Image: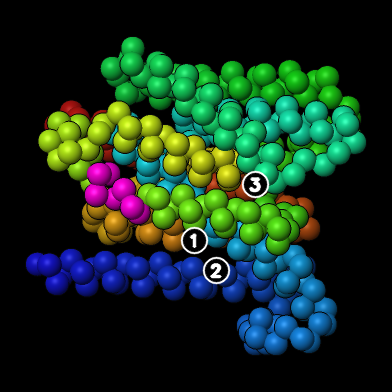
Amino acid sequence: MRKTRQYHYALSFGILFMLLILLLFFNIGIGSVSISVNDIIRVLLQSDIKDMFFRIIWEIRLPRTIAVTILGGALAISGFLLQTYFHNPIAGPFVLGISSGAKLTVAILMIFFLNQGRIISSFWMMVAAFAGSMLSMGFVLAVAKRVGNMSMLVVCGVMVSYICSAVTDFIVTFAEDSNIVNLHNWSLGSFSGTSWNQVETMSLVVFMTIAACILISKPIGAYQLGEAYARNMGVNIRWFRVLLILLSSVLSACVTAFAGPVSFVGIAVPHLIKFLFKTAKPLVMIPACFIGGAVFCLFSDLLARIMFAPTELSIGSVTAVFGAPIVIYMMIHQRKRNAL
C-alpha cells in the first residue's frame, strides 16, 4: 500500500514537472517573434552570443516567465494555508478580501509616489501590500470570532473585497490622469515588464516563506485533523494560527505587489492538486501546490498574451475563466457532501 502511494506521488509529480517544463518553453518561445527550442537552448547555454533572440529572451520573456512561475506557486500555497486555517474549501486570498486590501494600500502608495514624480520601489510595494493584507485579514478574523458559519465568513470576505475596491476607486477619482493609467494597468493584473531585480526580490521572499511552511508541515498536518488533536500533539494553537496568517499574507502580498490582484488561483489549484495526488499531506501539498500554481499561471499567462495578440488580456481575467468553474463545482460538491 505504501509503495503504491509513493508510486502515485512520483507519477503525479512527474506529470506536473513535464507540464511545467513544456509551458516554460512555450512561454519563452511563443510571441510576436517565435523562437524555436534549439534557439532557446542555445541562448540559455551560450550567453556570450548577444543577438536579437538573446535580448528577447533575457530582457523580456525569461524574467517574466520566472516571475509567473514563482508568483503562481506562491498564490497556490497561500490558498492552501488559508483553506487549512479556516477548514473551508473555498477560502483564498481573493475571496477573503486579502488581495483587495493589498491592492488598496499599494494603490494609495503608488498615487502618492507618482504625485511626487517618483517611482515606487519593489520593497515599498511589498510593505504596502503586506500591510493591506494584514488589515483585511484582521477584519475577517474579527468577524470569524462572531460568525460560526463558514459560508457567512466567505460572504464577509467578499464584502471586505467590495469595500476595499470602492475605496480604491474613490482614491483613483482624485488622482491625475497619467497616474490613473499606470494604476489601472497594474490593478488589472499583469506580469509584463518584470525586471531581474524584481525577480530577485520575489524569489528571496517567496522561497524563504515556503521554507518556513515546510518547517511547520507537521503542525499543519496535526491541525488538519482538528484543533483538539493538534493541541494534544503539543501545538500552540494561538501562535500557530498567527504564523499561518503571516505566511499566507506574505505570499499573497508578494503576488499583489508585483503582478496586481490575481483571482481564483489560490482557491482552484489546491483542490486540483488534492484531486491529482489523492492526499492533503502538507509535505506533499506544499511543493505540489507550488508547481501546480506555476503551471496554472504559466498556461493562463500564455493565453493572455496570444489569444488576441497584439492586445494582451489581464491575467486575472484568464485565471477567473478557468478558476471560477472549479470553485463553483467545489461549492456544489461540498453542499452535496454535507447533505449526506
Q: Is residue 22 left or right of residue 281?
A: right
Q: Are marks 1 and 2 in contact (CB under 8 Å)?
A: yes
User: What is the spatial separation of the Cα atoms under label 3 and label 2, in whole angstroms?
Assistant: 19 Å
* Residue 259: image tag: 3
Few, some or many residues within 10 Å of mark 3 (<14, 14–19, 20+): many
Q: What is the x, y in percent for residue 173? A: 80, 20
Q: Circle 1 sits on which residue?
A: 295
Comparing 188 with 147, the one in front is 147
Nearer-N-terminus badge (1/2): 2
Q: Circle 2 sits on which residue?
A: 23
Check disc 3 and give the amino acid type: Ala
**Residue at image location 80% in from the left, 28% down from the top:** 112
Residue 125 lies in quadrant:
top right
Nearer-N-terminus badge (3/2): 2
Give the extent of the magenta segment.
Answer: 214-220
Q: Is residue 45 left or right of residue 285?
A: right
